[in-house]
Image: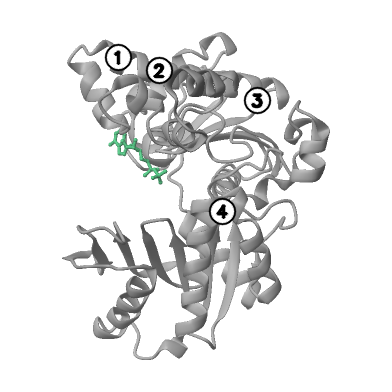
Amino acid sequence: MKILCINAGSSTIKFQLFEMPKEEVLVSANFEKIGESNSFYSFKINGEKIKKEIELENHKVATSIFLNELINLKVISNYDEIEGIGHRVVQGRSKYSGSVIINEDVIKDVESYIPLAPLQNSANLMGISESIKLLPNIKNVAVFDTSFHQTMDANQYVYPIPYEWFEKYNVRRYGFHGTSHKYLYNSIKELIGKDLKVITCHLGSGSSITAIDKGKVIATSMGFTPLGGIAMGTRCGDIDPSILSYIMKNTGKSIEEVTNDLNKKSGFLGISGISGDSREIEDGIALGNDRCRLAQDIFVNRVVSFVSYYYVLLDKPDVIVFSAGIGENSSMVREEIINKLNCLNIYIDKEQNNVRSKIQKISSENSDILCYIIPTNEELMIARETYELIS
Ligand code: ADP
């Protein structure tokens, strides 16, 4: 059975076509800088990469190019071969604790949640409406970033603010990257062969950390929006909320401008003044740049503060998992994090840690807690959930 996975972002749309249940990727394609003058797309098929610079006016154009290419490249001969489409949807609020087949009510809900994730949910909706328009006979499934986190207790998701804000305006911690955290938990459970207490660290340009007890999320670092939690590539993570009004008063910036600064000009980029990309931060550190060193120290400290808090919440985890762009690739960041956890008898094996993007145990033999790298695969998780729901 062929399942298409669609991940629509504000200026990107990513596709992967799977043969299920074999979990074989038949083709993957990324369309980037949609709506900008330098837009392009790339296809990966049979180990070969094809890249083309082309004007991509909007997501609709990108989707129809992708569908045409599926036939041109002879991946399929007919659209009826695709039996289901799984869509990433960022905000599903507390109503959606699992993936669902998309109908009109689901579309209305996703639309009504746009104010809680303006860029993300509106992009996700575009992907959904284009699929329905261009492939009207195929079932669509919504896989929410927030679903996996819906098992948290109120003492984790209610903020210490006027309770009315929660009741009337749904201001609460939702948590994000749920599809990735669930994939990581399932993978480590399968690897070790039993239910576990796990801390999953999804460290990419957006980063979040989750405490999971036997498959149930106990706590997660991102909050009401993906701006909360640890410091990230360009996002600030948790900060004192008074900073907003203070900066607005002193600079004359509007709430939109300050919010934009906290989303796009903070984190690694804000501190280093150089880049939001951790590779460039590491290069800066190698050249003796103090602000790059500071940016990485702050990042590592924030990760350690959540990991050590979740260690206590879980009453000692069995495993700590590292994943996503930084977690999978940066041996330096992993080593700095684990070294700060030595007082909890968590130790790194430097040699084992010297790898990229592969499943690998990186804790030493005398470590009380196992540490693993597990490459994440949100697209595969979406394909699995879609396959399960429609078959
Ligand atoms: P997202 O999916 O949130 O856009 P990714 O999971 O792709 O993010 O992670 C992007 C981050 O991973 C960037 O900060 C990038 O620098 C970092 N990264 C990717 N490859 C490496 C590497 N080889 N070494 C260090 N960091 C890396």
Residue shown at the point (52%, 15%) measured from the top left: 341
What amino acid does circle 4 point to?
A: Val
In the picture shown, does residue 207 fall above or below 138? above
**Beta carbon at label 4 within 8 Å of ligand 1:** no
Q: Label 1 neighbourhood size at 10 Å, few (<14), some (14-19), many (20+)?
A: some
Tag 4 residue? 90
Q: Residues within 10 Å of mark 3 (few under 14, many from 20)?
A: many
Circle 3: element type = helix
Rendering coords of residue 94 (x, y %)? 74, 51
**Where is mark 3, residue-wise?**
310
Instruction: Of the two numbered discs 2 and 3 on the same chain, state the one appearing first in sequence.
Output: 3
Q: CA distance from mark 2 to mark 4?
A: 31 Å
Q: Gap in Å between the C-alphas at discs 4 and 1?
A: 33 Å
Question: Is 185 or 132 nearer to us in this picture?
Answer: 132
List x then y, in percent, for residue 126. Answer: 48, 68
Q: Which mark is residue 291?
A: 1
Residue 200 at least partly seen: no
Q: Report how far apart the C-alphas of labels 4 and 3 lie in the structure.
A: 24 Å
Q: Marks 1 and 3, Cα distance to the nearest angstrom?
A: 29 Å
Q: Amino acid at mark 3?
A: Tyr
Q: Earlier in the sequence, mark 2 or mark 4?
A: 4
